[in-house]
Amino acid sequence: MQNGISKKIKSNPVEIANALGWFSIGLGVIQIVAPRMLLRLIGVKGSPGLMRLFGMREITSGVGLLTQQRKDRWLRARVAGDALDLASLGNALVSSNSSKGKVVLTTAAVAGVTALDLLCAAQTSQRPFQKGKPLFVRKSITVGRPPEELYAFWHNFEQLPRFMSHLKSVTTLAGNRSHWVAKGPVGLNVEWDAQIMEDKPNELISWRSLDGSDVDNAGEVRFKAAPGNRGTVIQVQLQYNPPAGRMGAGLAKLFGEAPEKQIAVDLHRLKQIIETGEIARTEGQPAGRPRSTSRKYDDLVRA
């Protein structure tokens, strides 16, 4: 039976890693929502607060497995968590307040999962990431400024985080390259290096990510004069490959990190910055809401 499991892991380690990711999220939710029930189930009289911390760790590991390319890193993080769980169960075994039979069964189950994590980590570290079907995003907006001004503003990549709420930093490198750090689901960071592929002053900037990026992506931004001297139409096209395919994209949407929503909001932020010099908010105004616009907009946009 063990040989059969090993063969399955070797044949499709990414699928097993994703399954372990969902297992981590499910277990973490139970640990946070019903810690006392779980403590009774495993026969341990412990702290519900500590159990909730373990649950947060499990959810973080699960999201990392489902959304990041380097799954072996997150599997090793799971192994470290498994070791902590086994140490806690070892202490419970010598405690007079625990149910020895339940603790022994739980320890055996955790040891089995640890072995699975170790095998899967070894296999995923030896294989390239398996990519799914790319997803596409297209958005546009009209800004009351000439194309020359908007092109110059956008081309200074290091100031893009001013209006791109999901970006933490952009660092310009040599050779038309740059390093990007963005916010991922539930506070995780994703990073990539990108290279400019085409650069037409005042008209077009196109780019693609380089090998080894956490998220494969490519896209372009076009600047076209709007009819009637109304400014410039900015058109953004983005192609990206979620680390866990469409399942990863769905998970990102669940945690409010969907690029199609982000880009639409970011373009409105850009319009406000360019036209008024700041991002408008209603908070603090006598007739305004305590927080500007909608709750979802606030959570995504407010710095």
Image (spheres, rainbow, N blue to C red):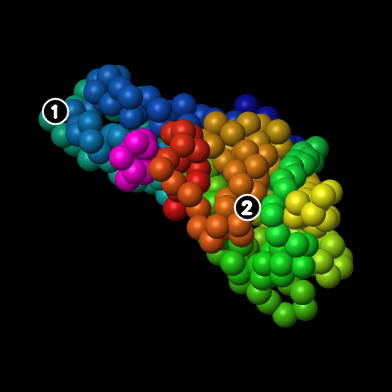
Please name the residue shown 62% across and 52% down the image.
Answer: 271
Which element type, helix, strand or loop, lies under badge 2?
helix
- Residue situated furthest front in the rendering: 228
Q: Is residue 303 visible?
A: yes
Left or right of 71 on screen, residue 84: left
- Residue 191, x across and y down, in percent: 61, 59
| Closer mark to the observer between disc 2 and disc 1 | 2
Quarter of the image where one finds residue 254: top right
Left or right of 35 on screen, residue 257: right
Left or right of 92 on screen, residue 33: right
Q: Tell whether position 192 is magenta.
A: no
Quarter of the image where one finds residue 221: bottom right
Identify residue type, mark 1: Asn
Disc sitting over residue 97 in the figure: 1
Residue 23's place in the image compared with 207, above or below, is: above
Q: Tell whether position 287 is magenta.
A: yes
Q: Residues within 10 Å of mark 1 (few under 14, many from 20)?
A: few
Which element type, helix, strand or loop, lies under badge 1?
loop
- Residue situated furthest bottom in the rendering: 174
- Residue 287, x across and y down, in percent: 34, 36
Q: Residues within 10 Å of mark 2 (few under 14, many from 20)?
A: many
From the viewer's side, name the closer residue of 11 and 71.
Answer: 71
Secondary structure, magenta segment, majority class: loop
The residue carrying mark 2 is 271
- Residue range highlighted in magenta: 283-291
From the viewer's side, name the closer residue of 242 and 224.
Answer: 224
- Residue 88, x across and y down, in percent: 28, 40
* Alpha carbons under labels 2 and 1: distance apart: 63 Å
